[in-house]
Amino acid sequence: MSATESSLVAPFGIDSWVELYDSDIAKIAAGPVHYAQQRSGQSLEIDRFVRDLQEQFFECGFGVQVQVWTTEQEGVYAFMVEIQKRLGPTWDPDQMVHEVTHNLLDLPGEQEGFLDTNEGMAELARKQREHKPHQH
């Protein structure tokens, strides 16, 4: 592919070699994913799109490799992003627990405040007993 080649961009996939926080997922959705969605179906310069996509991930704190794939439709390419490294502080499991227990992504049907572990379930049952309405 040459730097001047234009094509239509197809949806892309993301694979990660590093653990991601829920806040990372939210940043990626608002940054690089939004950026790519805005350009989907448009004619573009492939090399420029790859560089811009890498920059979008860099701004979110990640080093990535972007793979370009041909599709069955002539002139349409698909992109696969591999998140290869975290550029900021190392991954902290306590931060992940905090983000999951506070449902940072506002996932429907998810309760805040516990992880589905034996200890978490026991704590939830204890809280429900304490806050059970009195019947008269």
Image: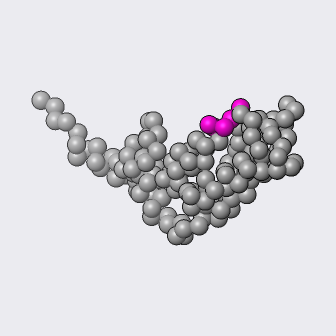
Q: In this view, does 66 lie to the left or right of 30?
A: right
Evaluate whether residue 121 shows in this view: no
Q: Does residue 81 appear in the picture of this structure?
A: yes
Q: Position of residue 102 (x, y in %)?
A: 39, 50
Residue in the picture at 26% in, 44% down? 129
Q: What stretch is highlighted in magenta?
A: 37-41
Q: In this view, does 11 lie above or below 85?
A: above
- Residue 84 coordinates in the image, percent (x, y): 68, 62
Residue 73 on the magenta segment: no
In the figure, is residue 120 to the left or right of 58?
left
| Rendered position, 100 above or below 41 | below
Furthest residue to the front?
4
Left or right of 132? Residue 94 is right
**Residue 106: image x %, image y %?**
43, 41
Residue 42 found in image quarter: top right
What secondary structure characterizes most of the magenta part? helix
Q: Where is residue 63, by image quadrant?
A: bottom right
Q: How many labels does the image show?
A: 0
Q: Residue at x 22, y 43 (%)?
A: 131
Along the line of sight, the residue nearer the viewer: 54 or 64: 54
- Residue sitting nearer the eye, 95 or 75: 75
For the point 53% across and 54% down, which residue is it? 24
Residue at left offset 48%, top offset 53%: 23
State whether residue 55 is above or below residue 1: below
